[in-house]
Amino acid sequence: TTYIYHFAQDFCRCRDTYFVESFNHMLLCYIPKHIHFSTSTFQMRMSLAVLDWNENVNRPHTSARKILDLRRPDRRTPMKALVNKTFVFVDALWRAYTARNSNNLQPLEEEERDEGEEEEDFEEGTLLQE
């Protein structure tokens, strides 16, 4: 005997794994398996993946069409054409980062160049310095 048959009401939320599989597939965009990341980089990439997922998980679709597939004739679910992903979280992260670090930003000094310091000799193709 197994517990799943005795207490099936406890497992009713695990009926569909579409969202879990979809999240894991999207996670590979941020954390590829063939690259090793340090702990801090891994946590940052995982956080970005979660923000991306939360923003785009239930985005609307523009149209739906049925695809007849000879390999899966019993498929009844139409394929949805989703709207483009949004990345509003990137702007929010950038604003938070710049607001937090605005005290540390120093304006860059422009290098002053003296005119006539460097001249190019077009006949010779060399750079002449005065």
Image (cartoon, grey):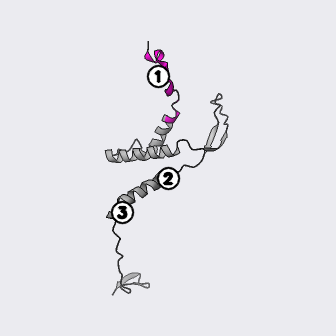
The Cα–Cα distance between marks 2 and 1, rounded to whole angstroms, is 37 Å
Q: In which quarter of the image is the N terminus?
A: top left
Q: For the residues carrying marks 2 and 3, which lies nearer the camera in this image? A: 3
Q: Which amino acid does label 2 sit on?
A: Val
Q: Which amino acid does label 3 sit on?
A: Ser
Which is nearer the N-term, disc 2 or disc 3?
2
Is residue 43 visible to us here? yes
List the residue tagged with mark 2: 88
Which is nearer the N-term, disc 3 or disc 1?
1
Q: Where does residue 60 sit, x and y in percent of width and height?
A: 60, 44
**Residue 66 magenta:** no
Q: Give the range drawn in magenta.
A: 1-19
List the residue tagged with mark 1: 10
Is residue 38 visible to us here? no
How packed is label 2: few (under 14 Cα within 10 Å), some, or many (20 or more)? few
Identify the secondary structure beneath mark 2: helix
Which is nearer the N-term, disc 2 or disc 1?
1
Q: Where does residue 37 sit, x and y in percent of width and height?
A: 34, 45
Q: Where does residue 44 sit, x and y in percent of width and height?
A: 37, 47
Please tell me in which quadrant of the rendered image residue 121 appears: bottom left
